[in-house]
Image (tube, rainbow, N blue to C red):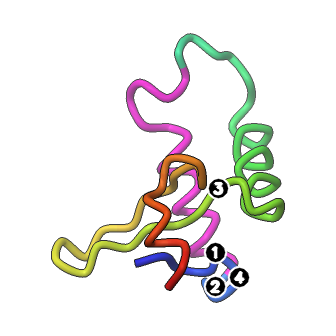
């Protein structure tokens, strides 16, 4: 299930993005400041290049590039 990012409270969205950009394997040696990485994700969400996926079975949210999401999820 896709969750429109603008429906999340600002602080919740920030925590979700920070969790995503600080996960193991996401920095690949990148020394970019956290605030810059968070802003990049926000821009990707604004542009519709990234989406928030919610899995009701596990109650987990994750961020993904829109191009990596199954097309049928985007039609709902």
Task: Give the structural element (helix, strand or loop) at label 1.
Answer: helix
Q: Residue at x 56, y 11 (%)?
A: 29
Q: Nearer the viewer, mark 4 or mark 1?
A: 4
Q: SS for tag 4?
A: helix
Separation (CA) of disc 2 from disc 3: 18 Å
Label 1 crowd bin: few (<14), some (14–19), many (20+), radius 10 Å: few
Answer with mark 3 or mark 1, whichever residue precedes in sequence.
1
The secondary structure type at the circle numbered 3 is strand
The answer to whether the residues at label 1 and label 2 have Cβ atoms under 8 Å apart is yes
- Report the label total: 4
Q: What residue occupies the far top of the structure in this picture?
A: 29
> Label 4, on which residue?
6
Residue tagged 1: 11
**Of the two numbered discs 3 and 1 in the rendering, the one whose residue sits closer to the viewer:** 3
Q: Nearer the viewer, mark 4 or mark 2?
A: 4
Q: In 3D space, how far apart are the residues under numbered discs 3 and 4 (Cα atoms)?
A: 13 Å
Q: Which residue is mark 2?
A: 9
Q: Position of residue 69 (x, y in %)?
A: 47, 56
Provide the residue designation for mark 3: 50
Q: Position of residue 14 (x, y in %)?
A: 64, 64
């Amino acid at each position: 299930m896709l969750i429109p990012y603008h429906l999340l409270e600002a602080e919740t969205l920030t925590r979700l993005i920070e969790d995503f950009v600080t996960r193991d394997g996401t920095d690949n040696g990148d020394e970019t400041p956290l605030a810059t990485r968070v802003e990049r994700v926000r821009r990707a969400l604004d542009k519709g290049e990234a989406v928030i996926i919610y899995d009701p079975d596990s109650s987990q949210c994750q961020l993904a590039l829109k191009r990596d999401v199954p097309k049928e999820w985007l039609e709902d």
